[in-house]
Image (tube, rainbow, N blue to C red):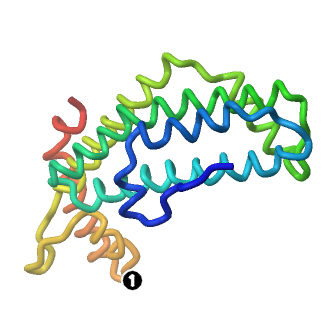
Amino acid sequence: MLKNLPSTPEAILAMEWSDYEPHFKALQSVELTAANVGEWLSDWSALADRLDEQFTRRFVATTQYTTDEEIEKNFNHFIESIQPNARTEEQKLKEKLLASGLQPANFKMGLKKMRAEADIFKQANLELLTEEQKLSGEYDKILGAQTMMWEGEERTISQMFPLYQDKDRAIREKAWKLVVDVRVENREAIHS
């Protein structure tokens, strides 16, 4: 059913809501039958895969390059402009499948999960999800900027974690204290 879905990371990252929307509309327009529900679910999965890949690539980039404003802007654009629309359309597709009464083969647990998701979906929560993701990004940015000196080498907090496993208790304690000191220094930024 769905044609021309991009398959390269670059093409997926370039997708805007206007690229996704026709595919959602095409899925919504299908009259579901026992004969076509498997293909319909497969097409929906392919579309959801593009959304997931775009989100994941943009999210991971924000955690790798915490000071890159363009990467942050692209991530925020996705969670503000694409993700809420996609979640709204996915809700419509869930409702469509559930209303059909069809029981696709080997999809009993999928239907159960889908029914629960459809039941708790609230449009107003999409704005809250966006805000939560932005706050999480700010938190990651603060943590990503935290560094300390260890034996003449600048290290991030995550680079300190292996030292917590050292056999020497003094090394473990010194590493832990350095991390705690840096976190205490940044507590106001984290809690604001």
Q: Is residue 17 above or below residue 70?
A: above
Q: Is residue 180 above or below residue 111?
A: below
The x and y percentages for residue 88 are: 55, 27
Judge left or right: residue 150 versus residue 42.
left
In the rendered image, which residue does mark 1 sit on? Answer: 167
The x and y percentages for residue 144 are: 22, 56
The x and y percentages for residue 81 are: 36, 32
Q: Residue at x 74, y 30 (%)?
A: 116
Mark 1 residue type: Lys
Please tell me in which quadrant of the rendered image residue 83 appears: top left
Name the image quarter holding the C terminus. top left
Q: Residues within 10 Å of mark 1 (few under 14, many from 20)?
A: few
Q: Residue at x 21, y 54 (%)?
A: 66
User: Looking at the image, which residue sits at the far bottom?
Assistant: 167
Question: 168 and 150: which one is in front?
Answer: 150
User: Looking at the image, which residue sits at the far left?
Assistant: 152
Judge left or right: residue 106 versus residue 153.
right
The x and y percentages for residue 136 are: 34, 40
Judge left or right: residue 25 versus residue 42.
left
**Which element is circle 1 on?**
loop
Question: 165 and 144: which one is in front?
Answer: 144
Tally the marks: 1
Q: Is residue 37 above or below residue 4?
A: above
Q: Residue at x 30, y 38 (%)?
A: 77
Question: 91 and 40: which one is in front?
Answer: 40
Q: Residue at x 38, y 32 (%)?
A: 132
